[in-house]
Amino acid sequence: MTTTNRLTIFDTTLRDGEQAPGFSLRIDEKLKMAHQLSTLGVDIIEAGFPITSEADAEAVRLVSTNVQGPVIAALARCHPADIDRAGWALTPAPRRRIHTFIATSDLHLERKLRMSKETCLEAAVNAIKQARQYTDDVQFSAEDATRSDMEFLCRVVEAVIAAGSTTVNLPDTVGFAVPHEISAFFTAILTRVPNATKATFSTHCHDDLGLAVANTLAAVTAGARQVECTINGVGERAGNASLEEIVMATRVRADSLPYDTAVNTREIFPTSQLLTTLTGESVQANKAIVGRNAFAHEAGIHQDGMLKDRRTYEIMRPEDVGVPQATLVLGKHSGRHAVQRRCEQLGVTLDRPELDQVYRAVIAHADREKTVNDRDLTAIVARVRGEAKRPSASVGHDFSTTPAESGYGHGV
């Protein structure tokens, strides 16, 4: 499984992502999001953690019943009751996966679980065998894998594969690792575990040090072929690896990351926007790929380059990820070319003296107000032309027909 260049996209927005404070979803909202994830083209949707509540169990069952295409997964601890509940919730899904986990690090075993290594190993094997009674597609996760004793972790991985686990996930649960460590970690596991070729290896990285995507890509280059990720990078604490960043890294840098996915990238931005709408939590303005400034340009030098050839300052096309268009935002850093271009789009042609005056007025306005919208620009043009009495009528522009170039997405 590790020789192919096809990556399996395991989306955990509805499970790990929903665990973030403020991101909980109602049952109907989970179903709506799951349908969009299917449209996006993810391979696996982790729909929830059924044992945690009746609502979560019902949400997983509803997604299993109504969403076609992706494998539907449910999380379960290595407890018999958890696995039975997950199995029940997944029953309607034509393609289903039970994802069972237990911590393997000394810290977690001693301080949280108060469990010996042998007991942990036994619980993991028993959980896999029980889960196989519900489905042939069983995933095992070793929580806090990257801080686990390597010899013990290899024993666990070998045992769960022998028991029937088809996917082994090795999470960087607290986002502690750095890329070269992740690469060496997966290389060691794949080399030392005798039956490693009988399972797909998966990576699940958290963003506590801002390295989730970098660590995920390092794991892939070392042999992992499933990536666990979320829309907008949502998740516990600082979040998870961002689906959109992983996918677009493989598209834009195929020379260095020659891996394929089934994701329809034109659905990335609509999916991001839907999650924002459902949760009421917007993404940061400068978020890669989906932030409102990801394809917005204010600096004059950049705007001039964009007007001549967009490739000068954009490494991907906004339409390729579903963003309507790049935007040249008028602000105190803008240049004359951008001001002239926006005036032309508003139906206003300026001669050179007028452009100089309008440009200076735009910069002065931006110093006070930070940005200049279309109504501001039209009023400035009118003042320069001595037509301040009815600025909108004097230039003959209908604001309802031309969108202002002030960024895009929620929070604008």
Image: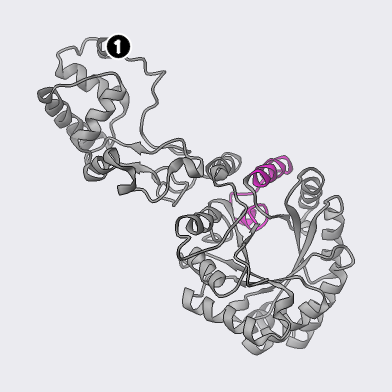
> Disc 1 residue type?
Gly
Q: Which residue has dot 1 on it?
A: 396
Residue closest to the eye, 74 or 253: 253
Q: Is residue 172 magenta?
A: no
Where is residue 120, by image quadrant?
bottom right
Q: Is residue 357 visible?
A: yes
Q: How is the image coloured?
A: one colour
Residue at the left extreme, as displayed: 353
Point out the image quarter for the C terminus. top left
**Picture coordinates of residue 245, whole percent (x, y):** 50, 56
Relative to 226, does residue 366 appear above or below in the rendering?
A: above
**Left or right: 68 as drawn, with respect to 3:** right
Point out the image quarter for the N terminus. bottom right
Q: Is residue 114 visible?
A: no
Residue at x-position 77% and y-position 78%: 160
Residue at x-position 15% and y-position 15%: 385
Q: Magenta segment, which residues?
A: 11-39
**Left or right: 357 as drawn, with respect to 314:** left
**Picture coordinates of residue 265, whole percent (x, y):** 55, 47
Residue at x-position 74% and y-position 48%: 69
Residue closest to the eye, 118 or 53: 118
Q: Determine the secondary structure under disc 1.
A: loop
